[in-house]
Amino acid sequence: MLLTNRLLVLAALSGWSVPALAQDVTVVRAARMLDVARGQIVNPAVVTIQGCANDAEISQLVVECKAELEKIREQVQNVE
């Protein structure tokens, strides 16, 4: 369930149709979609923010975000 919730959050951030995703998403399909969102949408955005950050607080948030993205990647691998 946690994996699906993370998918829905990333879907909302990326402009995907959250209600359509929430209706019928298998865990494996959710994991694959989450991995695509992580790799193609969120991670590049985080890298861009990191490159533009001139503030220690923002840099720390980027490090924390990357750690969370790594946790998501590991969870996806465990599902597949």
Image: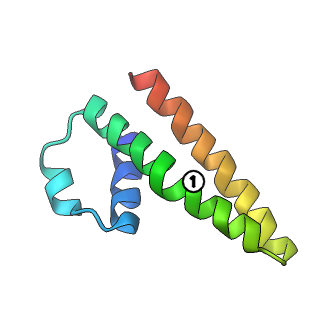
Q: Residue at x 31, y 68 (%)?
A: 15
Left or right of 3, for residue 18: left
**Above or below, comparing residue 78 to residue 16 in the picture:** above
As shown in the figure, which amino acid type bears the numbered disc 1?
Answer: Asn
| Count of residue discs | 1
Question: Dot 1: what SS?
Answer: helix
Percent across and percent down for residue 30 are 30, 39
Q: Residue at the bottom extreme?
A: 54
| Label 1 CA crowd tier, 10 Å (few <14, some 14–19, many 20+) | some
Q: Quadrant of the N terminus?
A: top left
Q: Is residue 56 visible?
A: yes
Q: Residue at x 46, y 57 (%)?
A: 41
Q: Which residue is mark 1?
A: 43
Percent across and percent down for residue 2 are 41, 43
**Above or below, comparing residue 60 to residue 58 in the picture:** above
Colour scheme in use: rainbow
Left or right of 7, for residue 77: right
Left or right of 45, for residue 52: right
The quadrant in which residue 24 appears is top left
Q: Is residue 2 visible?
A: no
Percent across and percent down for residue 57 are 81, 73
Q: Residue at x 21, y 34 (%)?
A: 26
Q: Residue at x 12, y 50 (%)?
A: 23
Left or right of 38, for residue 66: right
Q: Quadrant of the C terminus?
A: top left
Percent across and percent down for residue 53 are 77, 74
